[in-house]
Amino acid sequence: MIVRKLAHIINTWRHARGEGWESRRLVLAEDKMGYSLHDTLVKEGAELHLEYKHHLETNYCIEGLGEVENLATGEKHPIQPGTMYALDNHDKHILRAIKGDLRLICAFSPPLSGREVHDSDGSYSKD
């Protein structure tokens, strides 16, 4: 059994940060669960251009207001607490935090190691 508390992850190597976002990585590849689980904050006003070429991602909003834009179709979907969106086609997208910090619970498959950084195109490397 794995039990972790968010308070014990803050300010450790499992607490990744970038411009406009933070990811607190609760479950990672080393845990051998087949996915990784993250408690992510997107700072109010941030606009993240992302495309996970090697990973599928599901996001569930628990705080804040925002939107996700599918760059292939131009569709914009509002995000608020209780909204889930899944990037099931490695979708190139823009995630915007509009009012308050957007807090998302995110699952990645395959799981992240926890040490990835975004490439220039907004993706993570395959490994």
Image (cartoon, rainbow, N blue to C red):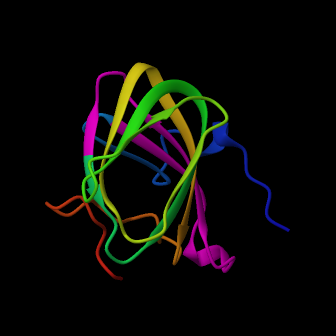
In this view, 40 is above or below 51: above
Could you say where residue 26 lies in the image, as x and y percent from the top left? Answer: 62, 55
83 sits to left or right of 57 = right
Disc count in the image?
0
- Residue 77: quarter of image: top left
Q: Nearer the viewer, residue 16 or 51?
A: 51
Q: Is residue 24 magenta?
A: yes
In this view, 63 is above or below 72: above
Q: Kindly identify the residue that appears in the image at 46 percent across and 64 percent down.
A: 114
Q: Kindly identify the residue that appears in the image at 66 percent across and 41 percent down.
A: 6
Q: What stretch is highlighted in magenta?
A: 21-48
21 sits to left or right of 5 = left
Could you say where residue 37 lies in the image, as x and y percent from the top left? Answer: 61, 59
| Residue that extends furthest to the left in the rendered view of this protein | 120
Q: In which quarter of the image is the N terminus?
A: bottom right
In this view, 25 is above or below 52: above
In this view, 126 is above or below 10: below
Q: Kindly identify the residue that appears in the image at 39 percent across and 65 percent down.
A: 115
- Residue 82: quarter of image: top right
Could you say where residue 48 lies in the image, as x and y percent from the top left? Answer: 27, 43
Q: Which of 20 and 83 is in front in this view?
A: 83
| Residue that extends furthest to the right in the rendered view of this protein | 1
| Residue that extends furthest to the top in the rendered view of this protein | 99
Q: Does the magenta stretch include residue 102?
A: no
Q: Kindly identify the residue that appears in the image at 50 percent across and 34 percent down.
A: 79
19 sits to left or right of 23 = left
Q: Which of 62 and 32 is in front in this view?
A: 62
Could you say where residue 16 lies in the image, as x and y percent from the top left? Answer: 40, 49
